Image (cartoon, rainbow, N blue to C red):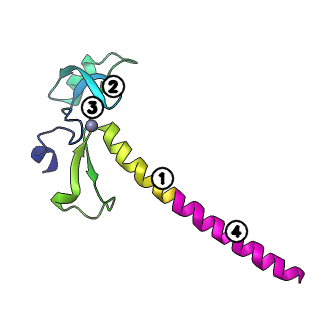
Amino acid sequence: MVLTRDRHRCRICKVKNYTVGHRVGHFVVVKGEYETYKEARAQAEVGYHIVIVLAVAHLNHDTTDNRDENLEARCQYHHLRHDREHHRENQLQTWQQKRQAREGELVRGEEDFI
Ligand SMILES: [Zn+2]
């Protein structure tokens, strides 16, 4: 299992699953490490602390590709960051496709007036 292989720590910042702390930039200032989410949640001060819950990221963004080398444990921050870069690439591609479609329509529209 990926979390076991990665020793229940984010592969980027090394923060442990169910850590309570507050984030400063890329890193978490640790208040404590706990064994369960419930335990961690009970120790977290609402509005100040966060609870780290690891998720498994697909490095190539293909969620059907579950080969070990494509999977890594990530904290919420680094998982989101990984996905955000991918979303940005997709958005740019979609925007370019829409622009090309609009330009195509404009060209076709002009032909109607000729
Ligand atoms: Zn991390």
- How many numbered marks have been drawn onto this rendered protein structure? 4
The label on residue 52 is 3
Residue 96 inside the magenta-drawn segment? yes
**Which amino acid does the dot numbered 1 rest on?**
Arg
Task: Give the residue number, with chain letter if any, for mark 4.
Answer: 102
- Decide which of tag 4 and tag 2 comes sooner along the chain: 2
The label on residue 38 is none
**Which amino acid does the dot numbered 3 rest on?**
Ile
Quarter occupied by residue 11: top left
Residue 82 x %, y %: 35, 48
**Element under label 4?**
helix
Measured along the vertical axis of the image, is residue 25 above or below residue 101?
above
Task: Give the residue number, with chain letter if any, for mark 2.
Answer: 23
Query: Which of labels 3 and 1 is toward the front?
Result: 1
Query: Which of labels 3 and 2 is toward the front?
Result: 2
Residue 86 inside the magenta-drawn segment? no
The label on residue 88 is 1
- Decide which of tag 3 and tag 1 comes sooner along the chain: 3
Q: Quadrant of ligand 1?
A: top left
Whether residues under marks 4 and 2 lie with C-beta atoms below 8 angstroms apart, the answer is no
Measured along the vertical axis of the image, is residue 88 above or below residue 77?
below
**Element under label 2?**
strand
Query: Which of labels 4 and 3 is toward the front?
Result: 4
Residue 60 x %, y %: 30, 60
Measured along the vertical axis of the image, is residue 114 above or below residue 34?
below
Assess mark 3: CB under 8 A from ligand 1?
A: yes
Query: In the image, which residues are magenta?
Result: 92-114
Alpha carbon of mark 3 to alpha carbon of mark 2: how far?
A: 10 Å
**Element under label 1?**
helix
- Mark 4: give few (<14), some (14-19) or many (20+) Cα within 10 Å: few
